[in-house]
């Protein structure tokens, strides 16, 4: 089982987290390459716009994207190719989405027969969440376009995962013992 997240939201979150050096939940000092990246690119928007191949600081942006932890990671780093993921299709029990993590966690608990009193942390520090910092609302459309191009492989991966989720919703809900009504409630969440 694993959870995926829209690459734009992951980018903004990762950029902001590393800019804060992991605070408030952690303190992970910058690498020298990250220090250089944040000295030049002070916002997620600025870095995204510099991904434009015609931008004056494009090469610095590419270096920064490959240097900033959380920003440089792609799904293929963890899962390999889509073909490798497809080959393991039968061993996948559950794919969640960060965008609906609370709802997906409830279903996962039912699938794995985890007691209903188990909950994800809601405290910002414990959940390593800063309200509003993960928003892609502040990204301009050009920034989004350059990021979508940068993360094109990740969008292919997310599409595969969303197709798997749509295909598996009713069987997963039934395994969870949700019954017909619960199945349709679960399907509507997918």
Image (cartoon, rainbow, N blue to C red):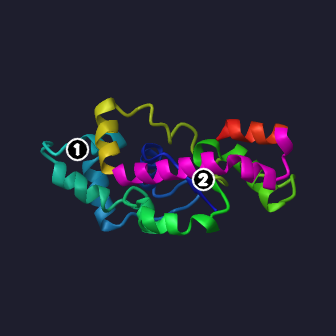
Q: Main secondary structure of the magenta part?
A: helix
How many angstroms separate mark 2 from mark 1 (CA)? 28 Å
On the question of residue 53 being in view, the answer is yes
Task: Please give the range of residues in magenta.
Answer: 151-180
For the point 43% across and 68% down, the residue is 80
> Is residue 167 in the magenta section?
yes
In the image, residue 182 sits, relative to residue 137, either above or below, namely below
User: Within the magenta stretch, is there residue 171?
Assistant: yes
Residue drawn at 16 percent across, 48 percent down: 57
Q: Under tag 2, what secondary structure?
A: loop
- Name the spot of residue 88 as percent of width and height, x first: 55, 69
Question: What residue would you read off at disc 1?
Answer: 50
The answer to which quarter of the image holds residue 186 is top right
Give left or right: position of 147 versus 180: left
Measured as percent of width and height from the top left, residue 70 is found at 43, 58
Residue at x 63% of width, y 64% of height: 92
Crowding at mark 2 (Cα within 10 Å: few <14, some 14-19, many 20+)? some
Left/right of residue 169 with respect to residue 144 in the rendered view: right
Mark number, residue 113:
none
Quarter of the rendering containing residue 8? top left
Q: Residues within 10 Å of mark 1 (few under 14, many from 20)?
A: many
Depicted 143 relative to depicted 174: above or below: above
Mark 2 — residue?
Answer: 128
Q: Nearer the viewer, residue 87 or 53?
A: 87
Who comes first in sequence, dot 2 or dot 1? Answer: 1
Q: Nearer the viewer, residue 140 or 159?
A: 159
Residue 26: x and y, percent? 56, 61
Residue 142 location, x and y as percent? Answer: 28, 33
SS at badge 1: loop
Where, quadrant-wise, is the C terminus in this rendering?
top right
């Amino acid at each position: 089982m694993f959870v995926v997240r829209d690459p734009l939201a992951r980018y903004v979150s990762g950029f902001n987290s590393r800019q804060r050096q992991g605070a408030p939940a952690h303190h992970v000092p910058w690498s020298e390459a990250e220090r250089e990246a944040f000295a030049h690119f002070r916002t997620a928007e600025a870095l995204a716009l510099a991904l434009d191949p015609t931008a004056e600081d494009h090469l610095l942006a590419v270096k920064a994207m490959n240097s900033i932890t959380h920003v440089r990671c792609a799904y293929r780093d963890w899962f390999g190719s889509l073909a490798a993921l497809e080959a393991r299709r039968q061993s996948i029990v559950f794919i969640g989405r960060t965008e609906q993590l609370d709802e997906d966690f409830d279903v996962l608990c039912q699938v794995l027969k985890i007691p209903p009193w188990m909950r994800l942390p809601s405290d910002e520090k414990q959940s390593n969440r800063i309200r509003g910092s993960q928003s892609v609302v502040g990204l301009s459309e050009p920034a989004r376009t350059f990021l979508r191009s940068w993360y094109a492989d990740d969008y292919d991966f997310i599409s595969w995962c969303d197709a798997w989720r749509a295909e598996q919703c009713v069987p997963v809900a039934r395994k969870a013992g949700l019954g017909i009504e619960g199945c349709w409630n679960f399907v509507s969440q997918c």
